[in-house]
């Protein structure tokens, strides 16, 4: 057999072995999230909902900087072994890269909702991408298309205890490293 033909046969054998390794072995491979971390098993997903907007739907002006800019009412489920929750609201479509609107950590496991215009009871608010320790309403620059605002809730097995001035990227890493489950609601908005 010639060298090119041997390489072709070897490549075909490697592909068959790889395909056999991906065959159903009774377990489901984990999928990667946008951060590169493996997603929790489906049984540990958090269901995040809002009475004001359906997943994938457009935000009303009252929840953006165009109007009152109040927080979205949210509710979520509690997976087993949850001691605390964290919440991150962000915009991956911001012109300068990922923009974090709100980070709240150490929300008690008994808190499973946020009222319209409110904050999660018992949580600690951290710094957002505007360098403020506060909520910053969705406010996409005009002419930048439709932005996707992710309201992600993370279940934590313990308190993460970060200081309020923690930068949002560092807070995100710590939250994702300590999460035992997560779920998100995504809403859109553009001007």
Image: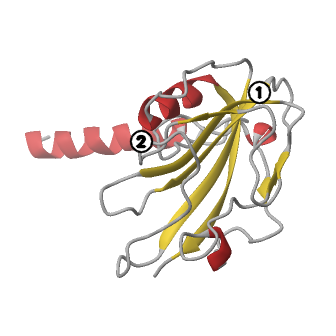
Nearest to N terminus: mark 2 or mark 1: 1
| Residue 76 appears anywhere in the view | no
Quadrant in the picture for residue 124: top right
The circle on residue 130 is none
How many numbered badges does the structure rendering display? 2
The alpha-carbon separation of the residues under discs 2 and 1 comes to 24 Å
Residue under label 1: 84
- Image height check: is 181 above or below 72? above
Mark 2 burial class by Cα count in 10 Å: few <14, some 14-19, many 20+: few
Residue drawn at 38 percent across, 72 percent down: 141
Q: Residue at x 81, y 23 (%)?
A: 83
Near mark 1 (Cα within 10 A), the count class, few <14, some 14-19 or many ≥20, is: many
Q: Which quadrant does the N terminus fall into?
A: top left
Depth order, front residue of 163/150: 163
Q: Is residue 106 visible?
A: yes
Q: Nearer the viewer, residue 124 or 56?
A: 124
Q: Badge 2 is on which residue?
A: 131
Q: Secondary structure at mark 2?
A: loop
Colour basis? secondary structure
71 vs 100, left or right, is right
Quadrant in the rendering for residue 26: top right
Looking at the rendered structure, the secondary structure element under dot 1 is strand
Q: Relative to the observer, which residue lies in front, 41 or 159?
A: 159
The answer to whether the residues at label 2 and label 1 have Cβ atoms under 8 Å apart is no
- Pinpoint residue 30: horizontal percent, then vertical percent: 60, 38
Where residue 54 appears, as percent x and y from the top left, is 75, 71
Callout in the foreground (2, 1) = 2
The residue lying furthest to the right in this view is 110
Residue found 79% across the figure and 60% down from its top: 116
Q: For this view, does 153 lie left or right of residue 96? A: right
Q: Residue furthest left?
A: 3
């Amino acid at each position: 057999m010639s060298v090119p033909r041997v390489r072709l046969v070897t490549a075909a054998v490697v592909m068959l072995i790889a395909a056999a390794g991906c065959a159903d072995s009774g377990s489901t491979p984990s999928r990667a999230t946008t951060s590169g971390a493996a997603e929790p098993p489906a049984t540990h997903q958090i269901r995040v909902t809002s009475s004001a907007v359906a997943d994938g739907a457009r935000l009303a002006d009252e929840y953006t900087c165009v109007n009152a800019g109040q927080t979205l009412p949210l509710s979520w489920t509690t997976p087993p072994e949850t001691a605390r929750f964290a919440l991150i609201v962000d915009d991956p479509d911001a012109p300068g890269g990922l923009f974090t609107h709100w980070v709240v950590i150490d929300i008690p496991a008994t808190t499973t909702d946020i009222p319209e215009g409110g904050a999660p009871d018992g949580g600690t608010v951290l710094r957002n991408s505007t360098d403020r320790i506060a909520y910053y309403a969705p406010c996409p620059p005009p002419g930048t298309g439709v932005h996707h605002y992710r309201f992600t809730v993370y279940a934590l097995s313990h308190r993460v205890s970060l200081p309020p001035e923690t930068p949002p990227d560092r807070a995100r890493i710590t939250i994702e490293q300590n999460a035992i489950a997560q779920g998100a609601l995504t809403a859109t908005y553009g001007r």
